[in-house]
Image: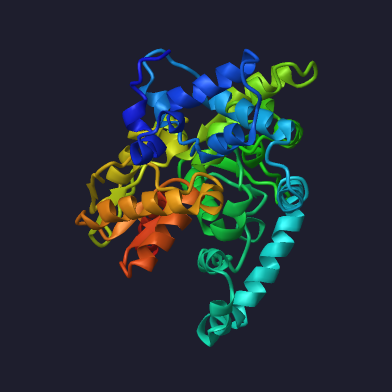
Amino acid sequence: MHCGMCLPTCPTYDATKLERNSPRGRIALMRAIADDRLEPTQAFADEMYFCLGCLACVTACPAGVNYAELFEHARAEAEQSGALDSSKRSLLRGFTLRWLFMDLSRLQLLGRILRLYQQLGLQTFVRRSGLLRLLPKRLRELEAMTPTVQPKFSADLIPPVLPARGEKRFHVALLTGCAQDLIFSDVNRDTAEVLSWNGCEVVTPPDQLCCGSLHAHNGEWELAQQLARKQIDQFPPEQFDAIISNAAGCGSHLKHYAKLLEDDPVYAKRARLWDEKVKDIHEWLVEIGIKPPSNAGAPQTVTYHEACHLCHGQKITAQPRAILRAIPNLNLVELPESTWCCGSAGIYNLIQPEMAGDLLKRKVAHIKSTAARTVATGNPGCLLQIQNGLRAEGAEFRVVHPITLLAEAYRGESQQSTA
């Protein structure tokens, strides 16, 4: 396809107006390499990593071109070619993708160390002491983005089996994620409680795995396959009515295990069933019929940012709004350019800080233009990115997952009934 209807929706093309920075230009590069007319050079690899992977082009494409799959395979080709190889890059990728995120006990250990550093006041001391001025500018920027680790991880907040409140209607599994578990374990707790309020018995194993999204999006196809097999073994899809994800980026990847394992004689059939059972939390609640909270809490005005892999990757746009509108005394104000990427995009804000920063400023400006003082969004990367952007501008907003707002309404209802 060469129609170019994707071009106005692509954040990188919008910023540079260069054809190579558009989906059409990138697909042309992929095709040239597939046809042996070009070699996978560093320029090709750089371009694949300049792409956000936001999938806005997939929504815009009238022909249904599967850019998501092309994008992942192109990054894998870039990695296999060795065009970006360097000792520093190999060390970083080896530490993060091949070691840290292959066993979440390692990530939790790192999280505990960071939590201790923060709780002892060492982070505050370092920031106030002026020591950071001795670091290069990029390291100072990265330090400012350091997330606050939760006091407790998901396994400390959620029992392995949480019974349904009232009549049990469904038996579901809850995926707690990796970064989500460290930084937003409270969102996982809220998700489990909301599911329980809606008649679901919730199974949440304490020792979970990375879904493999980070690996697939960064050219590590075989590692993503390994993690997919382990997920299917830990959460046998035939045992659950649904397998719930509350992170947009993870959910988008989790729904494509069938493609990832299509050539696996042992897992291909189970992967197809897995794809059918994986549900985003907003999607699932609307599908089963959400129980509206009866408690009318304090009035609040909320705006909603659509995480790219929720609206473009999973085509879930109406359901989060339906959940927010079900909360009494909540006034939902539409956000201008709500589907435009905030610049988080997995690790994009780490590897492409300039473009990510420009996108964040654009997003923050739109948020500030609303009458809201609360921003809801359904992805941990977006939550953290928008929190950092608003804080940098001194804007006092609450940034929260829609399910947290719903959980708070249910808790208010429970407290009212026991008063």
Q: Is residue 80 above or below residue 258?
A: below
Q: Is residue 89 above or below residue 78?
A: below
* Residue drawn where x is 70% and y is 59% of the image: 108
* Residue drawn where x is 58% and y is 78% of the image: 134
Q: Residue furthest right?
A: 266
Q: Image quarter for residue 262?
A: top right
> Which residue occupies the foreground of this view, 333 or 392?
392
Q: Position of residue 309 (x, y in %)?
A: 47, 36
Q: Image quarter for residue 18?
A: top left
Q: Is residue 329 above or below residue 173?
A: below
Q: Is residue 77 left or right of residue 363?
A: right
> Which residue occupies the foreground of this view, 155 or 413?
155
Circle count: 0
> Could one spot residue 401 in this view of the protein?
yes
Q: Quadrant of the C terminus?
A: bottom left
Q: Position of residue 187 (x, y in %)?
A: 50, 54
> Could one spot residue 411 in this view of the protein?
no
- Which color scheme does this rendered protein use? rainbow
Q: Position of residue 277 (x, y in %)?
A: 58, 27
Q: Is residue 181 left or right of residue 23?
A: right
Q: Is residue 308 above or below residue 67?
A: below
Q: Position of residue 44 (x, y in %)?
A: 58, 31
> Which residue occupies the foreground of this view, 73 or 346?
73
Q: Quadrant of the N terminus?
A: top left
* Residue drawn where x is 76% and y is 55% of the image: 105
